[in-house]
Image: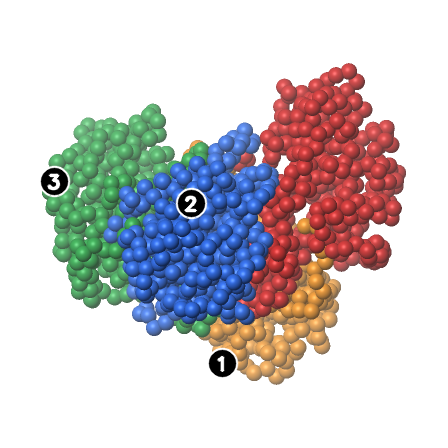
Chain colours: A green, B red, C orange, D blue
Amino acid sequence: MDFADSGTDLAFRREVGDWLDKALADVPDQEELSQDEREHWSRVWQDRLCAGGWAGLSWPTAHGGRGMDSLAQAIFNEEAAVRGAPYPLNGVGMMLAGPTIIAHGTDEQQARHLPGILRGETYWCQGFSEPGSGSDLASLRTAATRVDGGWRVNGAKIWTSNAHNASKCLLLARTDPDAPKHRGITYFLAPMDAFTVRSLEMINGDTEFNEMFLDDVFVPDSDVLGGVGNGWNVALTTLAFERGSMALNLWVWARQAVDRVVDLAVARGMADDGAFLDTVGALHCDAEAVRIGSMRMLGESRAGGVPGPETSALKSLWAQVVQNANRLAVQLDEAGGVLLDGDGAAARMRRYLRARAHTIEGGTEEVQKSILAERVLNLPRSR
Amino acid sequence: MDFADSGTDLAFRREVGDWLDKALADVPDQEELSQDEREHWSRVWQDRLCAGGWAGLSWPTAHGGRGMDSLAQAIFNEEAAVRGAPYPLNGVGMMLAGPTIIAHGTDEQQARHLPGILRGETYWCQGFSEPGSGSDLASLRTAATRVDGGWRVNGAKIWTSNAHNASKCLLLARTDPDAPKHRGITYFLAPMDAFTVRSLEMINGDTEFNEMFLDDVFVPDSDVLGGVGNGWNVALTTLAFERGSMALNLWVWARQAVDRVVDLAVARGMADDGAFLDTVGALHCDAEAVRIGSMRMLGESRAGGVPGPETSALKSLWAQVVQNANRLAVQLDEAGGVLLDGDGAAARMRRYLRARAHTIEGGTEEVQKSILAERVLNLPRSR
Amino acid sequence: MRATFTPEQREIGDTVAALAAGEKVRARDALTGPWRAPACDGLLLGDFGLLGVPEAAGGVGSHLIDLLVAVEALGERLVPSRFPAHAAAVQLLCGDDRPDPLPDEVLSGGRVLTCAVDVPGGSGWADAVSPDPLVRTLVPYAAQADGLAVLGPDGVWTAEAAGFAARDSVDPSVPLSDVTVAAPGRVSPAGAGVRRAALVVAAELCGVAQGAIDLAAEQARTRRQFGRVIGSFQGVAFQLAEAATARKAAWDLTLYAAWAVDTGRPDAGIQVHAAKAAAGRAAVFAAERCIQVHGGMGITMEADPHLFLRRALVLDARFGRGSWHRRRAGELRVGARAGAPPVPAAAA
Amino acid sequence: MRATFTPEQREIGDTVAALAAGEKVRARDALTGPWRAPACDGLLLGDFGLLGVPEAAGGVGSHLIDLLVAVEALGERLVPSRFPAHAAAVQLLCGDDRPDPLPDEVLSGGRVLTCAVDVPGGSGWADAVSPDPLVRTLVPYAAQADGLAVLGPDGVWTAEAAGFAARDSVDPSVPLSDVTVAAPGRVSPAGAGVRRAALVVAAELCGVAQGAIDLAAEQARTRRQFGRVIGSFQGVAFQLAEAATARKAAWDLTLYAAWAVDTGRPDAGIQVHAAKAAAGRAAVFAAERCIQVHGGMGITMEADPHLFLRRALVLDARFGRGSWHRRRAGELRVGARAGAPPVPAAAA
């Protein structure tokens, strides 16, 4: 077991680092910005990634990518995260839509959809979740009914990041209401012109998520991905790419959350307290476990496996360590963190409140534990 | 809301205290004794309680008791616990069998069974739990079949405290295998002559529990309590007395567990560490919450209510605080507490290991939480 | 010992709960506009002003618990009333050694007070010396009150704000300010006042915890996933059972501490620390669990769980932080054992 | 980066797991009689003695992880073998600056060593000065070993026991002694030896955690209550999921720390502390959960869960207590931030 970069990896990491240092030179500290300004920089950053040829880093060369492997992508993500780079505004396009279309799309679909992602012209969002189907994704009720030349879709989606910037949607809809719930679903590459998008304000004031309302939205047959009724299988591919894309950048957030609370305690003269040191010791363990576990997950999947259910342990650990570190930062803050005009207090509270979502988004804490119980411990289903 | 002793209560508390001080004068520190020696003192203590007229403290005078109320009993238990008195060897007789027979027994049964308890002649044990039915008490399978003049009982019981000293058993058995599980049960006041008793060694080396094997044991009709098929209702009475008897002495153990760990830390020069102080603060809160909650429970039941499902919160808090304090004592001990010949180390380890049972006995932690969820929070059944 | 609520206390609780339930001005309103007095504000200040006020301070023999029952009920519904801050200020002035009654206009609610206790840069009421001894922070409703009850190292006094700076509170329904007060003419010994006042905050926290639990339980009874209401999953149900246990512990500690303070028990000090610490922890925990049980909706501004978290955070921070109170309880417990007799043997 | 086990490592794990599974002498046996060497003891000492030994110390280029994989497998079955203590002793002598190879008789298992590291009254390997610098405590298998690898303030040395006193261990399958050693003739710098050895203990703890989880999961799959196997209740299942998460974290930390030590990474020190702390916590937690899931049977001597708890407690206490390692990790993390650049902005 070897955790070191190979010579090639190291050279690539340096190449990435050099590029990032230059590309990020004029990018301000995102933490200090408003939501609008962050979104502006996300767009700028997406354009720079596309221009720099990083958008299709791990896509096959046949599809215009650079044909590198998941480790290269992970190295890129890690180096970007370490430097506090903005989120690319079309992460869904690069990391989910592109790879899923490459895996399941027809030649025509690939030719039609992929170049726009690489060139930064088409932004995508992911229309999976619905108001009534949170953890129970397959219970989705958005309905697509057959019409001439395609489908007419009615329903609502929720928790859609970037829907207000996107023009295309990875859309799951029920095309056969009589089939078992995993069978009657179809996966669409839907144009969003007729979607109604409403932004959701989060408890920390950000509006990164949206609701989408579909009222007799027409989607042509040519935008069915992977066959009618096969949507659940295609969705599993997307979800696997989503898990994979977590590798080697989630841990950066965990480390930064721990470093921030340590810095705060040092600044406030509280870092030599026994209780604080014990807590930091525990946070260090969990944050490092996320980092190392991510490397092992990536290693396993490069060795031909797929990210296993242990991913759920990483997600769970990650959410906890970030939540705990961010809560502690608020507690250590002057005035218990509740005076938001204090130095850095608003950002600390924003991070604490944002982190409450970590045990909900991307599979709730309860779902992660169920997966561990059922698939790692071989216990019977408990839901 | 008033937590003070009334004048009468205070006078009684002093009377009890005076008696206890004298009666305990020659009783050694139970912690330092072997199991056999502790059992010896439990028997001596039971005899003294009977001779002193304390055995039927809260029984009606008509049945030979002193006719005092549950508060008096609680005051007695508390004062005894504070002084580290031995367990009385016939606690089941005084606290469970007597009150249950008074509530459900015929005149004949009362006349036959009660005096022996008050005189310290008949020791009782509680034959409810079975190897296959732990938390799911009503699923018991010990079977009583009708024979001439009574019942023939076959089955096994487990977790029976003091079975090796008892001659009578509060025995639940299934008399109607075809009835719904709560309906087919009958409650017997069974003579134990034909029981086979095997002691169970606990993980801390004590043998306070037993298994009992019943092989064609005959129980006469005259020992059916509360009617054939009515055993579940009678058992609920016993269980309510069991919960009630916890009031105002469980908390003493919690306080003592916290005091012990504080004393140890002071002796080891570790009591000024921030992490330790925070932990003691939290343990103090929980231990005091058990004490205050117990007083409120007693107050509610004296005001005509019955101990409600909140009892489960007290049991849960109590188990946690004792477990946490006893674990911390082992961790703070020299050599991490694993060298049992160190000063006081064996007793600390014995208490830590004994406390693991607190989240199992008397309703598991999981059952307590289920009760809270269903009966305090009105959530649907989850088991 | 009669550790039960009196009929009067039950009636107070029911009355205030009904007021709170009928109140139209909600904590949520302050998210989008300035704080407005709820309709029940005047009624509370006027009719409930004698709750918990000792006779020496001008009261009529009402116990501190009477007041806490009222405040708890307001906390359950997050009613954005000045009453708890005013009542805490009154309590702060009600220390054992108070020489004369409080002014009628205060007790009748005609003059609304608030508390100025927390010192900038400090964590508790005695752990830091303010660089400016006349500045206080985390003062609630400073702009909406007529005067301040101020705690200083030498005691308490009533003052008007010489100046104040509104701060940006995470819970806009409790506007917070930094306040500069005039130097006191006369300072009264604080006595038990600071303990009495801290318990008012603890009681509101217990209410917030209960409200968050109620909201979460309602969600757990109705939201369906995987074909079942989610409250039937122990993974969900047990979180709420833990929250309910923590809340019960905090409320019992608060009630007992109030009795201990009222009756001058020697353990009153540690019990107040325990109550404030436990109540803060219970409220924050319950609010976080309430968010979790609501799933995705829980992290949106339009659902209510975050309102409980905001209030919990502010109250936990005020009147000495929860973490400070917990540490103090630990210190006092350790101190009490120094030279204490060894724990007698118990059989377990 | 190839963060996967090598085929050789998988084979080592499988081989030792098979040995452990087939072993007839169990940890339980020592509850009722003296410690006996398991049948696999000699084989392990003889055939696996070069695992993890650096070339400079006489090894053949085996990585430390190779050894940890073997020790983890023994921990899963609680095999009462001297091998882990011997291997830790060998590692203790394998610091970076070792001038010459270890004696063949040690590497071949002909001379069985054990570790003498913990100082009476201390919590970690550098936090207390022994009143007698030549006394060590918590020495495993002292009576069953031929010599000791001793850690002192100036380095490590090999010694025979000048005297030892058998102590009463909570886990009789790991006999523990206080040992007095002769003053060293020559002391070698400990270098990374103490870190390498601590990871052997951490690896066994990870094995104990895994064994406890496996046993608990088996119980949860078979025991029925309320008409269902108890593993289908989330209240039971989620406890085990948490234990599995903690165990995975501990094992990942242990493997990474071994790599960091082997490759001389600057963060090796903090990672070893993190691994030992996390492994001890995971093992004790898993064993406690294993008891709980077994219900009443779990608290009886005749069921196996307590055996895991006993081993976990002893290993957590040895080679610096878990609590000391956690504190050290915290101190080092804080120290590393002193003067470090601020955390770069991340969007979350």
Point out which mark residue D42 bears. Answer: 2
**Tag 3: Cα neighbours inside 10 Å, few (<14), some, or many (≥20)?**
some
Q: Nearer the viewer, mark 2 or mark 1?
A: 2
Residues tagged by mark 2 and mark 1 found on one chain of the structure: no
Q: Nearer the viewer, residue C265 or D299?
A: D299
Q: Nearer the viewer, residue C336 or C342?
A: C342
Q: CA distance from mark 2 to mark 3?
A: 66 Å
Q: Secondary structure at mark 1?
A: loop
Q: Secondary structure at mark 3?
A: helix
Specify the amino acid type for callout 3. Ala
| Residue at x 36%, y 47% (from the top left corner) | D48
**Tag 2: Cα neighbours inside 10 Å, few (<14), some, or many (≥20)?**
some
Q: Residue furthest top?
A: B148
Point out which mark residue C131 bears. Answer: 1
Specify the amino acid type for callout 2. Gly
Q: Is residue A172 above or below residue B214?
A: below
Q: Position of residue C320 (x, y in %)?
A: 55, 68
Looking at the image, can residue B164 be seen? yes
Point out which mark residue A111 bears. Answer: 3
Q: Are marks 2 and 3 in contact (CB under 8 Å)?
A: no
| Residue at x 54%, y 31% (from the top left corner) | D224
* Chain letter belonging to callout 3: A
| Residue at x 12%, y 45% (from the top left corner) | A61
* Chain letter belonging to callout 2: D
Looking at the image, can residue A215 be seen? no
Specify the amino acid type for callout 1. Pro
Q: CA distance from mark 1 to mark 3?
A: 69 Å
Answer with the quarter of the image where residue C66 lies. bottom right
Q: Locate the N terminus of chain C and report the quarter of the image it occupies.
A: bottom right
